[in-house]
């Protein structure tokens, strides 16, 4: 099935079905930030919201791991072959760079951010991101300070809530954690995250975007917060790590704000729900926690089973369901020549749930993550040179939040239901989350 010299093109009917049944619903669910109404609507009524069955049928019909499909009007190469996926990601962004839709949409709220940069600009911005986020290091130098913020804010949330926790509790919690990790302990005003959300909702349109009325105010507030940043925070580090006119420091921080304040919040609550719904996993998390000092960043770092649980939430319900690239020059992929300017897509929501190749596709399997090997079939944090620069920090914050929430507390998932004896659903609507809590 691998490596065709000529890549098949999907029929008109397949293109029509893909666009009407899959592309349009995911567009409405939100390209850059989930739209609560449409996310809830499509999750409730769509039989295959992650297009797993559709892509499985396509692969069988065309007997290929590569296929040209249209995403709306753009002809796109779908890459299902793990070696092909590795090739694309290992050559991002030098050959496989940011695609137009992503570039235009993200430029609305974070122009010049690393993820929509190319060539030398990308290299400089990536260097800066890696220096401040300490990419590749399990523990950030300010891990202890971040942990103290997480523990304080989590305690405040628990004190203020009754016997139940809902999405809104976690949304506020993560906005407060985000502001303090980025700008310093005590910076609890979250008006910037709200303004950013407004701009991201606008960017979901993806086309004909004019300058947001929030843009100047947002970046003025960003500049002020960064200048005032003191103590052990990412913004304070930004002021000491070398940067140039190309770096565009504030525009990099915007990406951290949405990745931490929203993406990470969604993934953390889903992991929490999965653990609570799987009693054996719940016990293993608690056993592991019992062996560590949870007030030390090293103790949090050593929670490897819990980390597997967080990775599993992301594998099962990837918050970046599709990675989109555009070839900047001609290349050979799977034995076929791909012209410059081709849009290339990697469908995480399919690859992560491919029942024909993954025995654990639809079950919660944290053990899969206990080995250190890198598997290019799973790209919820992406892989290769353009992989998530905040990976270690994100995993640390998620583990610290869950470990703190689990200390002295037990949870039951009231909704949306999760039944461990059945294949897990293709989407999980975090907006409807309701957890019952009781003393452990
Ligand atoms: C669970 C939370 C997170 C998830 C699921 C996630 C996922 C991803 C993914 C899939 C990409 C690649 C996107 C693409 O190539 O189209 C990415 C890139 C990136 N992420 Fe994350 N991320 C998370 C949290 C964070 C955090 C907390 C930060 C920073 C504090 C961060 C910083 C970045 C940066 C800077 C890039 C761009 C890398 C580049 O283009 O060179 N991420 N992330």
Image (cartoon, helix red, strand yellow):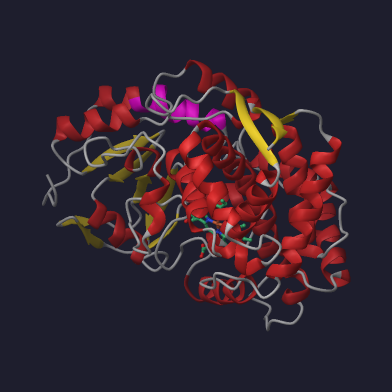
Residue 256 showing in the rendered view? yes
Q: Position of residue 128 (x, y in %)?
A: 61, 75
Q: Which portion, as a residue range, is magenta? A: 18-29
Q: Position of residue 395 (x, y in %)?
A: 56, 57
Q: Relative to the observer, which residue lies in front, 277 or 189?
A: 277
Which quarter of the picture shows residue 265?
top right
What residue appears at the point 41 percent right and 52 percent down from the top-left corner? 379
Q: Relative to the observer, which residue lies in front, 207 or 394?
A: 394
Query: Within the displayed image, which quadrant is ligand 1 positioned in?
Result: bottom right
Q: Relative to the observer, which residue lies in front, 392 or 16?
A: 392
What residue appears at the point 54 percent right and 73 percent down from the top-left corner? 137
Whether residue 378 is situated above or below residue 57 in the rendered picture: below
Left or right of residue 103: residue 351:
left
Left or right of residue 435: residue 155:
right
State the quadrant of the N terminus.
top left
Which quarter of the picture shows residue 185?
bottom right
Residue 107 showing in the rendered view? no
Left or right of residue 250: residue 419:
left
Left or right of residue 201: residue 157:
right
Which quarter of the picture shows residue 405?
top right
């Amino acid at each position: 099935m691998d490596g065709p010299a000529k890549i098949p093109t999907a029929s008109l009917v397949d293109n029509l079905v893909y666009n009407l049944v899959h592309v349009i619903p995911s567009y409405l669910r939100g390209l850059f930030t989930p739209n609560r109404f449409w996310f809830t609507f499509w999750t409730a009524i769509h039989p295959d919201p992650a297009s797993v069955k559709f892509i499985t049928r396509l692969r069988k019909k065309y007997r290929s791991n590569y296929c040209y499909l249209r995403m709306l009007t753009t002809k796109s190469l779908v890459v299902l072959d793990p070696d092909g996926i590795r090739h694309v990601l290992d050559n991002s962004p030098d050959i496989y760079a940011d695609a137009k839709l992503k570039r235009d949409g993200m430029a609305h709220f974070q122009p010049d951010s690393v993820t929509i940069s190319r060539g030398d600009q990308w290299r400089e911005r990536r260097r800066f991101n890696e220096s401040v986020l300490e990419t590749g290091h399990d523990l950030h130098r300010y891990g202890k300070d971040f942990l103290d913020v997480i523990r304080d804010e989590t305690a405040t949330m628990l004190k203020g809530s009754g016997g139940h926790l809902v999405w809104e509790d976690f949304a506020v919690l993560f906005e407060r954690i985000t502001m303090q990790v980025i700008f310093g302990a005590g910076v609890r005003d979250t008006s910037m995250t709200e303004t950013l959300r407004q701009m991201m909702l606008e960017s979901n349109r993806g086309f004909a975007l004019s300058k947001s009325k929030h843009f100047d105010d947002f970046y003025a507030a960003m500049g002020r917060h960064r200048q005032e940043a003191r103590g052990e925070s990412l913004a304070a580090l930004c002021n000491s790590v070398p940067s140039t006119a190309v770096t565009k420091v504030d525009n990099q921080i915007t990406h951290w704000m949405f990745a931490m304040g929203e993406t990470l919040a969604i993934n953390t609550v889903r992991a929490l729900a999965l653990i609570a719904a799987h009693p054996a996993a719940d016990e293993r998390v608690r056993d592991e926690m019992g062996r560590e000092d949870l007030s030390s960043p090293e103790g949090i770092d050593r929670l490897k089973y819990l980390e597997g649980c967080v990775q599993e939430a992301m594998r099962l319900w990837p918050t970046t369901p599709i990675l989109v690239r555009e070839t900047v020059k001609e290349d050979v992929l799977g034995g076929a020549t791909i012209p410059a300017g081709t849009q290339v897509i990697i469908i995480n929501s399919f690859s992560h749930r491919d029942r024909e190749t993954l025995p654990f596709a639809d079950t919660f399997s944290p053990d899969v993550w206990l080995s250190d090997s890198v598997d290019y079939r799973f790209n919820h944090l992406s892989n290769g040179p353009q992989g998530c620069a905040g990976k270690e920090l994100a995993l640390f914050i998620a583990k610290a939040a869950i470990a703190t929430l689990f200390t002295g507390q037990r949870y039951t998932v009231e909704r949306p239901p999760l039944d461990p004896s059945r294949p897990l659903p293709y989407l999980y609507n975090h907006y409807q989350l309701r957890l019952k809590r009781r003393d452990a």
